[in-house]
Image (spheres, rainbow, N blue to C red):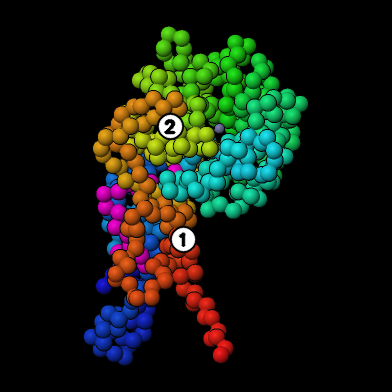
């Protein structure tokens, strides 16, 4: 029998009282009959835990209680857990954080690009191990309430947002060019009103030669004390990448679409633009933002060979990228394995680095007490091909797949049912295989409900 510390204390207290009048043999029998209430709701047993914040990469058991990480140890007794799942051979990582997605779905507005391109997050995230996303500027301050009401408040995925400096957000390139519609004060005010959800300011798609959109975004970011993410729009000699990275952006601001090659990331000699290294020295962060047009092997390979890795790996998920070379977070992560990064380096750039970039340091790690957003990943070995935004292929021999995703300590997705019984072992009329303590797949509660009984037909 195994008992936890609390139970031992209780039994000793009971024991002392009992022992005043009873022989010790009876006491021992009584102790033997005291059963511990499970200390943990869920135990993931035997997996390889990669937790970049604590530099942990080793076989560990991980226990969860009340939606939080309760213990990470070499061996945790399954008798202490209400539910144990064997995940030997798999990797346990913090829930992945994708800081560049577009999840503002159709709002009925004609000509709205965001409406045409945004996807519902839950359909793409949980099955890829992603538990947190940041929408990258689909909405501006005039549209944020709509994004919140229709997407943020209704998704199982934790949805955060960069607010577009354009008041109405991404409605299509021609509707995102009005400099008068890029005002710092109302954007900052909205960001301050929703500090828990708005993690940054976004500028994107600007087609003119001025720095004005970047300046206004920086102004809003400075007022609200949040970072700015820059999609640098069209390439102009009047506003070169070097000026953005070496003088405009502040430490902690984020340059996205790093490997697009659309704005001089690769210089004409075929080398990484020296401004990238200069920017990094100043504390500027660099994000992948794969998307439909923003990741090319001919750019990524030479830049990475010169040692310039991304700070954060992200998808730029939208309808134009989801079925092309991008696909999903794990596919983009697998590309970096194919480029020679270690699994630990890839997980760092998909979890803890991302949490730090958006100043959500309560996320992205597996420390005891942290929210139990967890991914259980399988590293498959074989012959794989990875496409860039132009559908050019790079071969690789490893691919990450998602076996299980936990959000707030409960399973929200699983591929092979590692946590479930075979149907043949269940009662003939089974209706439930989970428990609300660890299961959010089977809509806890519904499995327990009685089937409505139809009143007997009157004859
Ligand atoms: Zn984007």
| Residue at left offset 67%, top offset 40% | 191
Quick one: quadrant of the N terminus? bottom left
| Callouts 1 and 2 close, C-beta under 8 Å | no
Residue 126: give x, y in percent of width and height: 46, 49
The residue tagged 1 is 440
Residue 102: give x, y in percent of width and height: 56, 38
Which one is nearer the viewer's eye here, 9 or 348? Answer: 348
SS at circle 1: loop
Q: CA distance from mark 1 to mark 2?
A: 31 Å
| Residue at left offset 63%, top offset 43% | 106
> What is the residue that sits farthest to the top in this orientation?
269
The residue tagged 2 is 325
Is residue 220 in sight in this rendering? no
Is the CB of the residue bearing disc 1 within 8 angstroms of ligand 1?
no
- Tell me the quadrant of ligand 1: top right
Q: Which residues are magenta?
A: 78-96
């Amino acid at each position: 029998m195994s008992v936890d510390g609390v139970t031992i204390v209780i039994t000793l207290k009971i024991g002392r009282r009992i022992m005043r009048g009873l022989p010790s043999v009876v006491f021992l029998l009584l102790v033997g009959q005291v059963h511990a209430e499970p200390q943990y709701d869920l135990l993931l047993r035997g997996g390889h835990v990669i937790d970049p914040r604590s530099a942990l990469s080793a076989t560990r058991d991980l226990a969860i209680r009340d939606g939080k990480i309760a213990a990470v140890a070499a061996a945790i007794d399954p008798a202490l857990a209400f539910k144990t799942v064997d995940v030997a051979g798999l990797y346990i990582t913090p829930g992945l954080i994708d800081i560049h997605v577009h999840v503002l779905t159709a709002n009925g507005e004609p000509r709205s690009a965001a409406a045409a391109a945004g996807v519902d997050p839950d359909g793409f995230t949980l099955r890829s191990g992603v538990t947190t996303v940041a929408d990258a500027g689909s909405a501006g301050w005039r549209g944020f309430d709509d994004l919140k009401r229709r997407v943020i408040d209704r998704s199982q995925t934790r949805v955060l947002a960069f607010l577009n400096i354009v008041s109405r957000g991404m409605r299509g390139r021609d509707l995102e060019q009005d400099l008068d519609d890029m005002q710092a004060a109302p954007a900052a005010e909205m960001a301050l009103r929703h500090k828990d959800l708005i993690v940054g300011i976004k500028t994107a798609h600007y087609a003119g030669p001025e720095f004005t959109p970047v300046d206004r975004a920086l102004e809003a970011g400075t007022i609200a004390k949040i970072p700015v993410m820059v999609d640098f729009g069209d390439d102009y000699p009047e506003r070169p990448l070097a000026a953005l990275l070496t003088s405009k952006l502040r430490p902690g601001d984020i340059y996205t679409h790093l490997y697009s090659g659309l704005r001089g990331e690769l210089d004409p000699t075929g080398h990484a633009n020296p401004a990238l290294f200069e920017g990094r020295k100043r504390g500027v962060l660099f994000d992948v933002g794969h998307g439909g047009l923003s990741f090319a092997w001919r750019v990524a390979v030479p830049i990475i060979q010169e040692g310039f890795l991304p700070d954060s790996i992200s998808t730029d998920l939208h309808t134009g990228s989801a079925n092309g070379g991008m696909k999903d977070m794990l596919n983009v992560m697998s590309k970096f394995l194919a480029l020679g990064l270690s699994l630990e380096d890839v997980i760092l750039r998909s979890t803890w680095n991302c949490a730090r970039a958006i100043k959500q340091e309560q996320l992205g790690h597996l420390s005891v007490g942290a929210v139990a957003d967890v991914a259980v990943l399988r590293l498959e070995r074989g012959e794989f091909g990875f496409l860039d935004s132009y559908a050019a292929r790079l071969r690789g021999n490893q691919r990450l797949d998602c076996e299980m995703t936990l959000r707030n300590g409960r399973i929200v997705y699983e591929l092979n049912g590692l946590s479930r019984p075979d149907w043949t072992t269940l009662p003939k009329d089974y209706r439930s295989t989970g428990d609300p303590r660890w299961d959010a797949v089977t809509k806890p509660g519904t499995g327990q409900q009685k089937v409505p009984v139809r009143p007997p037909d009157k004859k």
